[in-house]
Amino acid sequence: MANRYFSRRSSPVICICALLVALNGCSSAVESQQTLIENVSVVDPVSGLTQNQQVLIEDGKIAAVADTSQALTLNANAERFDAQNRYLIPGLWDMHVHFVYDPTLTNEMADLFLDYGVTSVRDTGGDIEQLVKLRDALPSPKPNIYISGPLLDGKFVVYDGSDPDRPPLGTGVPEPGAADAAVAALKEAGADFIKIYELVQPETYAALAAAARQRDMPIASHVPLMMTADSAGPMADSMEHLRNIELACASNWQELLAQRQQRIRNFTEGLGYALRAGLHSDQRIPAINNYDETRCNQVLDTLSSTIQVPTLRLNTVTHLKPFQREDWPAALAALPQATQFAWRARIDRLQQLMAIDPTFSKWSVFLIERLLARGVPIGAGTDTPIGLGIPGYSLHTELEFLVQGGMTPQQALYAATITPAEFFNMADTRGRLTKGMQADLVLLKDNPLTDIRHSRSVEAVMLAGEWVRK
């Protein structure tokens, strides 16, 4: 991992211009700021590996990608950066994070993302005012941060703040008539997209989706417990965690859904978190045990335009135990002391638990191959910092699990670069190493296409044309 590096030096153009003003005045024709990355192997998520390249960055964008034998026009003050034997990839995204979930970590997350080459993140649930203030207040350099505001839930709210271990990430939208005002308020407050949660009613789900569409806001969603993935998914732009797909893929899905709907209708008092947890506990494993591939293919075929963000890193945390990795102690040591203390206590409790059923963990990894076979788009996200998710570090773990599930390293990189840009309709300006793209870049020591674990070998990070880690 690269050491943190903040360039506070003034641009040579600014310095020269100031001197000229002092003497004779400065010409209005100021040269563009250029950086030339030379002798580098370019790893593009679409075209793959191209060796012996030079990449010209001008005013925050990629101005040219060319063979080293080609002559490029450079300004006299252009910075030249020799990247011999190094690999250049687009800046990575984490499509599922929560900045305000762990207050001990909130203010450190942006820096940690950049340390690991994550230049853009999608915050998928939290208080909108707090998130907007945080995004504005974080000092530069900082990742590109896109926020949804609170989880839009039903009459009962899963994350209502009643449990001190679970912050108030959600808000209730109890009926369809409240949907338009809720979405309008989020848009006005600064939300970039919306996130619909699990206890919302089907009619309200449709109303929220319509309100977001009217305002050109992308839609992220869990599968509401009153619905199935094939009925909810086509109304959303992304679905999270592969959660509740298992019910839709079961041979007895209609029976399970009817039981679930009846329990929700009969729930008149209590905590939303307890209602959801009970349904998952009672139905998830039986649904997986009744997996029907023909039925599942029918479900997945309805999701060809809905990005799946599996968060395998989260789904497997109790089974595969990230804290047993060799690189975990060093990564944990970079977190604030209060976070380390709390997380070590959680790990101790987890180690004392009896054997944990790995069925959902294994099923989540298994489903990646099925998604690929049915042409369902996949995006990389982690749910950091929930479930011992270290910002930045966990994204690379997610890439490893995506490859274990059947993706090639290049497909995994696509999931962490182009797919997130597609969610925001930014694929024409983000995610590739081609002319005209925003220069969010990561320089690696080793080739990630030969081993996706090499995505961790970060040596330098560029954000909008400026080196922010070097």
Image (cartoon, rainbow, N blue to C red):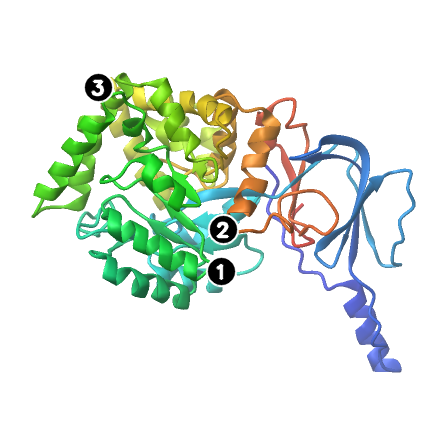
Label 2 close to label 1 by CB (< 8 Å)? yes
> What residue does disc 1 label?
138
Quote the CA–CA distance across marks 2 and 1: 8 Å
Q: Residues within 10 Å of mark 1 (few under 14, many from 20)?
A: some
Q: As drawn, is 229 to the left or to the right of 327? A: left
Sequence order check: which comes first, mark 3 or mark 1? 1
Q: Which mark is residue 110?
A: 2
**Front residue of this view, candidates 240 and 127:** 240
Q: Is residue 463 left or right of residue 396?
A: right
Q: Judge the density around disc 3: few (<14), some (14-19), many (≥20) Cα neighbours within 10 Å.
A: few
Rendered location of residue 267, percent (x, y): 9, 43
Would you identify the image quadrant in which residue 67 lies? top right
State whether residue 344 appears in this view.
yes
Q: Nearer the viewer, residue 237 or 242?
A: 237
- State yes or no: discs 3 and 1 in contact (Cβ < 8 Å): no
**Residue annotated with mark 3:** 354
Query: Residue 339 location in percent, x, y?
Result: 36, 43
Left or right placement of residue 369 versus residue 77 in this view: left
Q: Using the image as rendered, state which of residue 370 and residue 203 is in the foreground.
A: 203
Number of marks drawn: 3
Quadrant of the image occupied by residue 126: bottom left
Q: Earlier in the sequence, mark 3 or mark 2?
A: 2
- Picture quarter with the C terminus: top right
Label 3 and label 2: CA atoms lie apart by: 36 Å
Q: Secondary structure at mark 3?
A: loop
Separation of residues labelled 3 and 1 (CA atoms):
42 Å
